[in-house]
Amino acid sequence: MTIRAIVLGILFNYIVGSHQISSPNDDHYWAGVVEFSFKERSMNNESGLISTPKNLEKYKEIINSPEADPLDIIVFPEYGLSQVETASFVPNPEDLITPCNNLDYEPVVRDLSCMARARQKYLVVNLVEKAFCPEKDDWRPCAPNGLYHFNANVVFDRHGRVIARYRKFNLFGEPGINITRWSDITTFDTDFGVTFGTFICFDLMFDEPALQLVRQGITDFIFPTMWFSELPFLTAAQIQQSWAYANNVNFLAAGSSFPEIGSTGTGVFAGKRGRIVTVMNHNADSKLYVAQVPKISRPQATISRQPVIKYSSSEMSNLKLKRDQIDGYLMSTLPLNVSFYEASLCQGSVCCNFTLNYTVTLPSGPNQSYYSYVLAVSDIKRTFDGFSDGMITTCAIFACTDAEDHKTCATRFTDPATTVAEAVRFNSIDIVGEFPGGFNVFLLPNSVDTSILPLEVDEIEYNERLFQQEE
């Protein structure tokens, strides 16, 4: 499979301070997603009383920037304002309250409401919400201070009103944060004719609420995240594009940025049409990424992709990557003495058939390393850092740094002194697997390259066929 890079030049024409709000009749809407650095806060061990006001000022700079002028909606990542010390009461969205200048609410919520109203934009901001407990029908014991604390997305409309609130249901650790008794199914309507669903980070790995929203027909999603990327299947942009592609939905992902601990990954994805803009950083960065998003209901609408920024594998070695528990997979090393290879592998109830066409050019120079590859199948249970468990059924091919040691698979050459040669060039990869069905099974295609970005959608072909089991 030959990798192609197609760069499209994009020209944005707008007048600062005077932009046209998108309407229901338009084929597109304008969205901004923010990658936001929390490195300074972490390195300096800043309390929320210090970091939250500083970050709020940086949010204000982004919202007021010329780059934000054409936008209908701006999405900020998880964790940017998420400190228990500065937790905020949030109005019930049903009441359509505008917190701007309302002293019943904390400065964070007041200021965000004022920003949304002043700039006439929808804002989606992740913060720590506090609420009195117990709430109706919640029999669980309260904390001694009588408060819940939720990891929450809060949505402001163009008038600064709180029109939606989502409380994260699937926590990734997060001590001191509560969950609701049942998952929130949160949607909100916009004046440009799009209804959004929203969830947060680790929620993406579960049926509730993410796939429930898909089944309800929601086509556009807001996804604040502080993702900790993991090879070979769960790096941030990789899983964002995969989820959007499999569900054929628009996906607006805003990621917190601190690559040294594994966090980066921001983008806008247009379902099966692939990325509009995406980034995986090797240095912490705060930046607004702008996209003209074609509405799913307008499949003929044009799509304007931003030039993709691909960093080298040596640069991306600064991004810390976890490793999946793949040692229990059944693996077979790809032979390097042929150029065509077919194999079938089975584990548990799953069998995978592989057909590969490739060119091998082993390096001849001194001190050169290269990746070898394994074919793999899995039908095993895994844990997500002990916070949750799930069955992973996979047909895959992935890289190893040592062909003789499968424990080096899903790892990288990270020594700057190492010269990595391209020993294997894939001309085509064909993988066919038969997987069990069911309401709790979610299938998706998945890819990642050495720049820790997924392949372009025009470089892959993916098909599903449903087979009825004979009785």
Image: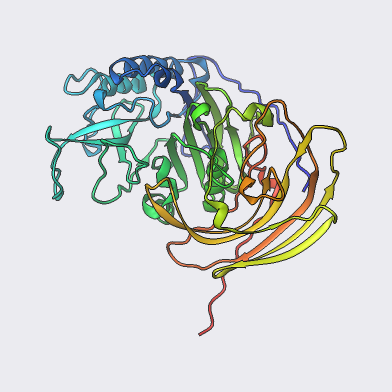
- In-front residue for pair 245/169: 169
Residue 299 visible in image: yes
- The answer to which quarter of the image holds residue 355 is bottom right
For the point 31% across and 36% down, which residue is it? 151
Percent coordinates x, y for residue 265 in the rendering: 53, 33
- Image coordinates of residue 56 in percent, x first then y, are 36, 18
Residue 307 visible in this rendered orientation of the protein:
no
Q: Count how many numbered circles sit on residues in the image.
A: 0
Residue 27's image quarter?
top right
Out of 377 and 182, give the one closest to the viewer: 377
* Residue in the picture at 30% in, 37% down: 165
Q: Residue at x 67, y 42 (%)?
A: 456
Q: Residue at x 27, y 37 (%)?
A: 177
Q: How is the image coloured?
A: rainbow
- In the image, taking residue 317 as reference, residue 219 lies left or right, namely left
Farthest-out residue, bottom: 471
Residue 39, horizontal then vertical, whole percent: 45, 21
Q: Is residue 231 above or below residue 285?
A: below
The furthest residue to the right: 364
Task: Answer above or below: position of 276 versus 397.
Answer: above
Q: Where residue 191 appears, x then y in whole percent? A: 40, 35
